[in-house]
Image (cartoon, rainbow, N blue to C red):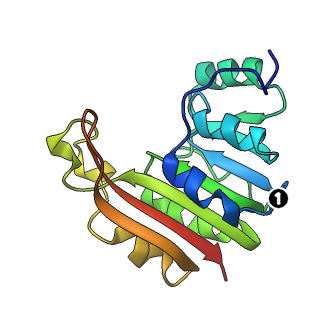
């Protein structure tokens, strides 16, 4: 199937709004990409995309629908960072949290690279999964974590996705120093 005609779920609105920070034609890593809603959108914008996820089935579907996207099956919580020595013009993380990975992401940005991050925070448990505090950010946690490592260009938190599917989120856009 042709990438330009394939139907894909909508990408993150936060990513779309802040994609102008990404170097045109740049190399982008979509972390915990799943079936690739963001990866496909990024590829359609002309970026060179690598999608990494532990779900081999989801990545196989993504690869069959978008062969230009590089995919890598890897459990980021169990194995070593597979991109040591590699740098990306952008790293995108949506709805995924593994705290030990946060400084690694910052260190994997190329000069003028951008990190676009969006995930759940405390308060979301009243609306559904995740409800485990290990997977919910504390207030200002993304900003506090990345402030010493990157320059924060945009940040917001709270009930950011309204009914019918409410979500309590933190969103951050940060630039390599």
Residue 108 visible here: no
Residue 44, quarter of picture: top right
Which image quadrant is residue 39 in?
A: top right
Q: Name the residue nearer the viewer: 38 or 133.
A: 38
The quadrant the C terminus occupies is: bottom right
- The answer to whether 52 appears left or right of 14 in the picture is right
Q: Position of residue 127 (x, y in %)?
A: 19, 39
Residue, far left: 126
Residue at x-position 22% and y-position 42%: 131
Write down the quadrant of residue 3 in the picture. top right
Q: Which residue is mark 1?
A: 24
Q: Secondary structure at mark 1?
A: loop
Using the image, determine if residue 151 lies above or below residue 41. Answer: below
The one nearer the camera, 131 or 100, is: 131
Q: Is residue 101 placed above or below 42 in the rendered structure?
A: below
How would you rate the neighbour count of disc 1 (Cα within 10 Å): few for under 14, some for 14-19, many for 20 or more? few
């Amino acid at each position: 199937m042709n990438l330009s005609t394939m139907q894909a779920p909508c990408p993150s609105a936060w990513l779309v709004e802040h994609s102008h920070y990404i170097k045109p034609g740049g190399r982008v890593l979509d972390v915990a990409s799943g079936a690739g809603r963001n990866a496909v959108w990024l590829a359609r914008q002309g970026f060179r995309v690598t999608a990494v996820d532990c779900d081999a089935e989801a990545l196989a579907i993504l690869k069959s629908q978008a062969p230009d996207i590089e995919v890598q099956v890897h459990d980021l919580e169990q194995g070593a960072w597979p991109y040591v020595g590699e740098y990306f013009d952008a790293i995108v993380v949506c709805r995924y949290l593994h705290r030990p990975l946060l400084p690694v992401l910052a260190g994997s940005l190329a000069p003028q690279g951008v990190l676009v991050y969006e995930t759940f925070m405390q308060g979301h448990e009243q609306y559904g999964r995740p409800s485990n505090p290990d997977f919910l950010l504390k207030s200002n946690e993304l900003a506090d974590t990345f402030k010493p490592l990157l320059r924060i260009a945009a940040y917001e938190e709270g009930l950011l996705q309204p009914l019918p599917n409410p979500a309590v989120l933190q969103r951050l856009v940060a630039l390599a120093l």
